[in-house]
Amino acid sequence: MEPSLGTLLRDRRGEDWLVGPSSQEFWRWLDQLTPRFAAYQVACPAHDAGVLMAEPDPLRFLATALAAWAADCTVVLANPHWGHQERQQVQALVNPQWGGPIQAGFGGYPCRVPGGEAGQLLIPTGGSSGQIKFAVHRWETLMVAIQGFRAHFGVDPVHAYCVLPLFHVSGLMQALRVLVSGGQLALQPYGDLKAGKRLALPPGGFLSLVPTQLQDLLAQGDDALPWLRGFRAVLLGGAPAWRSLLDQAQAQAIPLALTYGMTETAAQVATLLPEEFLAGHRSSGRPLPHVVLTIVDDQGRPRPAGQAGAILIESDALAQGYLIRPKQGAATLAPAPPSLDTDDLGLVDAAGYLHIVGRRSTKIITGGENVFPEELEAVLLATEAVSDACVVGLPCDRWGQQLCALVVMAPARLQDLPTLLGPQLAAYKRPKRWILVEALPRTAQGKLSRPQAMALAQQVVGGNF
């Protein structure tokens, strides 16, 4: 059984475990913040008292989040770069006091978590409507996922090179794997890595990337290839990777590990081992030891090997529920069922490898981020410059899918739309292409026909995505 977070922090106290940022500064800040959050937790006897984490600096984020969590606070992770639209949603969910951080200079703010319990960790994700919700984890669920990762790769300690945001499960789990296993964590903005500034991590570590980042690094040629080959695995996930990119990585002997997972599962549930990738496999690998995957039909019945269906996940690492706000009513903490019926379609072959074949909803994944067209369309219509709108995801080698908005509006106002959306949405949610149309395709019942809208967009744009 893994020790508690507080015990781990005491056991590793003073270790030089960070590469890039100062470990000494981390420990100094942790010592400063821990009693402050412990006092806050005691002074807030209500079960719904929490801490919203919206800190852009990775080192300050790590120190603040771990101090609050170790003090048994309910910690809510947030993207510090969310726009006005997203912040309004968060305000309705947890009512953060943005103007008054619990400790001056650190982005941890008092908030309220309806139905929350001490020691919970809430990680943001998207719902089927595009509305922000939070998956509810505990230390125990994340530790199950970490044990499964270490067993799957047969490594201990875990060293990780993290260029992904820590408020995402993909970044957070890297830091926790390192902390739990006694490894070292390199923390660096991706822009610095792309510019050729590389940190020195012990051999046999893990680098996590989304496909566009891998594409950037492969384009650097001989300057980056030996460095990439030095990792135990380059974990690749967040968005579908295109075949030519994978073939290029194999030709250059890059030890890719294609992964499948999500916030609700504490990151990976299936991962292809690098040696399998280099041998020509292109699946998402076999399930990790702590996971049971079942492919089911529309009635929930298991499907035979090789037949596609919905992916059902059972694991002790699953989130215990969601903090959501229904269309009518206040925010509430909804318990999760014992198994996760995902939005993904896949199949498991006779050798036990998972293959992802599609998605059941309208969700678009661009650059590793989930985007829901309904949310963007509502924001476009709210500008009053647009009378009708449809957002589709065009196939794109660089981003996986590229956001394209078809709009009905006065032509003279089209150029104003990017400016109008700027403060409303995070940058990754803003369409990259705009198509002016006289009318959008609709069914006889008046419902928007997304397949016809996609076909129209592809016809207008052609193959130049």
Image (spheres, rainbow, N blue to C red):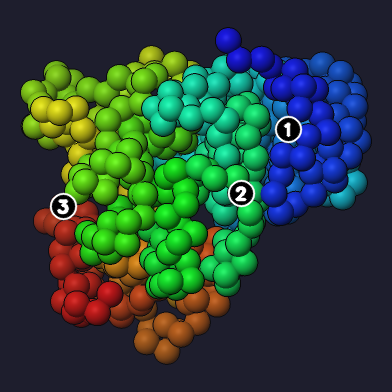
Say left or right for 190 vs 359. right
Q: Quadrant of the C terminus?
A: bottom left
Label 3 – label 1 distance at C-alpha: 52 Å
Q: Secondary structure at mark 1?
A: helix
Q: Quadrant of the N terminus?
A: top right
Q: Which residue is mark 3?
A: 445
The mark lying in front, picked from 2 and 3, is 2
Q: Amino acid at mark 2?
A: Leu
The answer to which of marks 3 and 1 sits earlier in the sequence is 1
Question: Residue at coordinates 21% horizontally, 54% vertically from top-left?
Answer: 447
| Alpha carbon separation for disc pair 1 and 2 | 22 Å
Q: Is residue 298 visible?
A: no
> What is the x, y in percent for residue 358?
21, 45
| Observer able to see residue 41 | yes
Which residue has dot 1 on it?
66
Q: Residue at x 23, y 68 (%)?
A: 440
Amino acid found under the numbered disc labelled 3:
Gln
Residue drawn at point x = 45 percent, y = 61 percent: 226
Q: Which amino acid type is marked by label 1?
A: Leu
Question: Where in the figure is residue 446, as x and y percent of width and height?
Answer: 19, 56
Q: Is residue 217 left or right of residue 409?
A: right
Assign a secondary structure to mark 2.
Answer: loop
**Distance from label 2 to label 3 (Cα)?**
59 Å
Label 1 CA crowd tier, 10 Å (few <14, some 14–19, many 20+):
many
Q: Which residue is mark 2?
A: 201
When the figure is inspected, residue 159 is found, relative to residue 332, above or below; the finding is below
Q: Reply above or below: 387 against 369.
A: below
Q: Residue 187 got which mark?
A: none
Q: Residues within 10 Å of mark 2 (few under 14, many from 20)?
A: many
